[in-house]
Image (cartoon, rainbow, N blue to C red):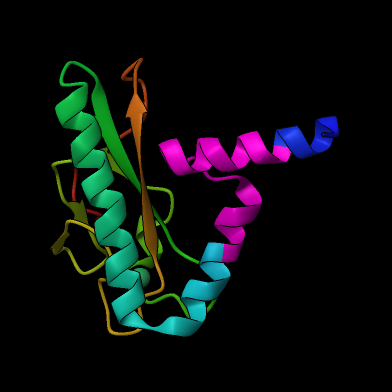
Amino acid sequence: MAKKDIKEKLKGIITLAFGVETEKENQEGKANLAGIGPEATDAYAKAALDEGLELKKEFSDVRVIKTWFTNNDHFVCDICRPLNGVNVEVEKPFIGGDGKEYDRPSACPDCRCWIKSSTDILGETELQNVPISQ
Ligand SMILES: [Zn+2]
């Protein structure tokens, strides 16, 4: 087996075992998501949130955060726009552009946003802790 094939195979196994995504797969996921609609947005976001809550259960001493991403194009609504790149602790809500709390996307009927959960071992990630002022 060629070295490249082994690497590909290993990558597949690691992805299965840990849900590790490459940036390319992530981009493809987003592209798919854009065409599917709010159910997919909800399902994808719920899975990412559950993953974060699992992480928190497993590593209770470590800060676990979630990050909100928008497609950052002119279709993004005023609720979601200010949330692009915003981090909060995994159990805490995001504050949308409308001042309301959102645990995860979707935040509007056309929402195409997604979140990612991750550990913040150093606890140095800047968190959203005040409502966005208009
Ligand atoms: Zn959105």
Q: Residue at x 36, y 53 (%)?
A: 115
Is residue 40 magenta-colored? no
Q: Is residue 1 left or right of residue 98?
A: right
Q: Is residue 19 left or right of residue 31?
A: left
Residue extending furthest front?
A: 1
Query: Is 37 situated above or below 124?
Result: below
Q: Position of residue 5 (x, y in %)?
A: 78, 39
* Residue 9 in sight: yes
Q: Is residue 132 above or below residue 17?
A: below
Q: Quadrant of residue 119?
A: top left
Q: Quadrant of ligand 1?
A: bottom left
Q: Is residue 89 left or right of residue 20?
A: left
Secondary structure that dominates the magenta span:
helix
Residue 129 shows in this picture: no
User: In this picture, which residue range is highlighted in magenta?
Assistant: 8-28
Give 56 or 95, whichever is nearer the viewer: 56
Residue 40 image-quadrant placement = bottom left
Where is residue 12? Give x, y as percent.
59, 43
Instruction: Provide residue 89's location: percent of width, then percent of height.
Output: 21, 37
Q: Is 4 rendered above or below residue 41?
A: above
Position in image of residue 70 (x %, y %)? 45, 63
Name the one closer to the observer, 71 or 41.
41
Q: Residue furthest right?
A: 2
